[in-house]
Amino acid sequence: MKITLSIFVTVALIFFSFNANNTNEDLPETDNKEIQLIPAHLMMNSCMEVRYPMKPIRPTHIHQVLPPFVGSSFVGFKESLAFKESRGNYFIVNKLGYMGKYQFGLGTLQLIGIYNTGTFLRDPALQEAAFRSNVSRNKWILRKDISRYSGENINGILITESGILAAAHLSGPGNVKRFLRSNGMYNVSDAFGSYLSDYLHRFSGYDTSRIPAIRNPKAG
């Protein structure tokens, strides 16, 4: 039994020794050359430790979006008002049915000669004409109030022509008259919580003097 075990161990040692000797000889000559060409300082002899952040790094999101700065002219007035209404989107319709860049209602559009809402939404130039016509119409209706109240201070708000016209865009010229003539006691808001007084204050610093007051302007 001892003799058989010895023979088995001897054969096994010879087999593994033979394979070990032939391992490097079986490698292609090109592989050996490539290994020899690796510089010593680039060869790795040990494992490399890599550490990762304990907490994931999250990207920073900027939620505040600012309107384009176009000065205090009428262009600045209309673009700032459009940004407040729709972020300047010509093709949007809100859940209450107000349409386009300046969020017009159907009733107001009809007053300035626009009856096809599909055409209105697809035509940015028509929307710009509609806004200008509506400002002219409101300026005509409120011309006496603009003359009387401009420069006055009501509830801490400096009353200006541009503020009055912006408030009229929000709530209609009739409500602006009631606010001014009640010394600010009558202050309405829209369905989204924007008050007439907010628009009087926010849009008070623009020059709208070049927009004519027209009794019955038509955009369509």
Image: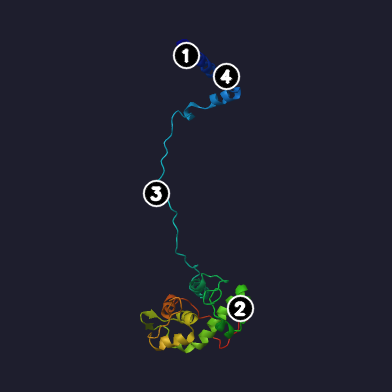
Closer to the N terminus: mark 2 or mark 4?
A: 4
- Disc 1 and disc 3 in contact, CB within 8 angstroms: no
Q: Which mark is residue 25?
A: 4
Q: Measuring 41% from the left and 89% from the top, which residue is drawn there?
A: 181
Instruction: Give the distance between the C-alpha atoms of the residues marked 1 and 2, in whole angstroms.
Output: 101 Å
Question: Quick one: 64 or 214, which is closer to the camera?
Answer: 64
Q: Earlier in the sequence, mark 1 or mark 2?
A: 1
Q: Nearer the viewer, mark 2 or mark 4?
A: 4
Label 2 to label 4, Cα distance in Å? 85 Å
Relative placement, left or right, of 195 versus 16 is: left
Kindly report which numbered mark, 1 or 2, lies closer to the viewer in this rendering.
Answer: 1
Residue at which label 1 appears? 5
Q: Amino acid at mark 3?
A: Lys
Q: Residue at x 54, y 24 (%)?
A: 36
Residues packed near mark 4 inside 10 Å, few (<14), some (14 to 19) or many (20 plus)? few
For marks 4 and 1, the one nearer the N-term is: 1
Q: Residue 129, position in %: x, y? A: 59, 78
Q: Are marks 1 and 2 in contact (CB under 8 Å)?
A: no
Label located before the other in sequence (1 or 3): 1
Quadrant of the image occupied by residue 160: bottom left
Q: Amino acid at mark 2?
A: Thr
Secondary structure beneath dot 2 equals helix
Local secondary structure at mark 4: helix
Whether 61 is drawn above or below 37: the answer is below
Judge by depth and name the residue closer to the eye, 31 or 171: 31
Crowdedness of circle 1 by 10 Å Cα count: few (<14), some, many (20+)? few
**Residue at 60% across, 22% down:** 29
Q: Position of residue 97 (x, y in %)?
A: 54, 77
Q: Residue at x 51, y 84 (%)?
A: 138
Q: How far is disc 4 from disc 1 in space, using C-alphas?
A: 31 Å
Label 2, on which residue? 117
Query: Callout 2: 10 Å neighbours few (<14), some, many (20+)?
Result: some
